Image (spheres, grey):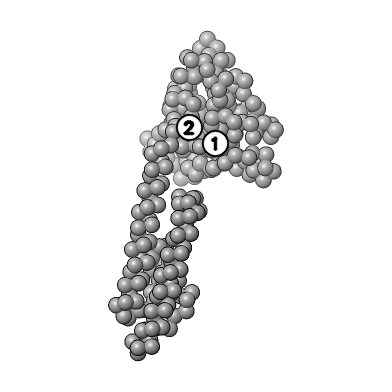
Amino acid sequence: MSHLHTFSKVIWYSILNTFVTLTLTLWISLKILRKYRIREPRLSVFTCFLGVISGFINQGVELRLRSLTARLLQLNATVLGVMLYISMNAVLFSKLSQQDESLPFKTIEEIIYERQKSICVRNDSFALENIKDQWENQFGKQEDVINRNCPDVRNPDNANKAVCEYGMVVLESKQMMHSLLKKKIVHCKVSNADRRYFITGNVYIAHKQFKEFGLIENFIKTLRSTGIIKKLERKWLEINYVNTGGITRSDLGQVDFRHVRGQQTAVHSRNS
């Protein structure tokens, strides 16, 4: 349905008018051809419309037309459909090329050294505890980076502020996100990051304009250097071993953003 927003309403109205015109032209042409005893099927206006619009939706409804005139009319509808597909792709590509990067940082190191932003992790979460454990002997770096002036995303009252006003949010639990959306607590656009992680799948990417998975990959690499990814890998290995009846670490690919899904971590960046 999102593709319907590719063209403006005026263009869609013009497209519909074109299809209606072709439909009526085909229907009237068939009646005239039958009048001159040219064997053509008796088709209703609706059937003619299906035949015309099939050129656009690429379903190829067969009207069993015999005369060259009638076939040319249906061919025109098919050509129009191809042109519309090409135009739609061109518009979508142009929109993609004009998009700006949505996250306010390039790397985690930028946050650590410039001290201008904060990494917010769900309070008392698996992710937060492991980050603290890994960084506890590194001169307290995490105190100026992790959860500095961050809202507690466990509190529903903070959900809309956390999701809609800050840069990027990963909230765990489809059930939690569904509840917030159903109660209209979160008012901005929320999309599900449809990538598999181990067996479970329960993370939503909530962001006004979430575009770049690559930036998150950099964050995952940083988590790997802190040791949290090792625990993810161990869990991944254990789950796969149980469900497949035996698997070795060499059979597993690198854990990346796709694998973090379902680990009940919540990460979002914000300006300090």
Q: Residue at x 48, y 32 (%)?
A: 102
Side (left or right) of 119 relative to 101: right
- Tag 2, which secondary structure? loop
- The kind of residue on which mark 1 rests is His
- Tag 1, which secondary structure? loop
Residue most toward the left?
Answer: 68
Q: Is residue 133 visible?
A: no
- Percent x, y of residue 166: 57, 29
Position above or below: 41 against 57:
below
Question: Residue 53, located in which quarter of the rendered image?
Answer: bottom left
Along the viewing direction, whichever of 43 and 1 lies nearer the viewer = 43
Question: Residue 79, located in which quarter of the rendered image?
Answer: bottom left
- Mark 2 / mark 1, whichever is N-terminal: 2
Residue on which disc 2 sits: 102
Question: Which label sits on residue 18?
Answer: none
- Percent x, y of residue 39: 35, 87
Q: Residue at x 54, y 42 (%)?
A: 191
- Percent x, y of residue 227: 48, 23
Residue on which disc 1 sits: 207
Q: Residue at x 45, y 19 (%)?
A: 109
- The kind of residue on which mark 2 rests is Ser
- Circles 2 and 1, Cβ within 8 Å, touching? The answer is yes
Q: CA distance from mark 2 to mark 1?
A: 9 Å
Side (left or right) of 28 relative to 38: right
Other residues around mark 1 within 10 Å, as few (<14) / some (14–19) / many (≥20)? many
Residue most toward the bottom?
Answer: 37
Along the viewing direction, whichever of 97 and 151 lies nearer the viewer = 97
Q: Residue at x 42, y 77 (%)?
A: 27
Q: Which quadrant is the C terminus positioned in? A: top right
Question: Residue 140, located in which quarter of the rendered image?
Answer: top right
Residue most toward the top?
Answer: 139
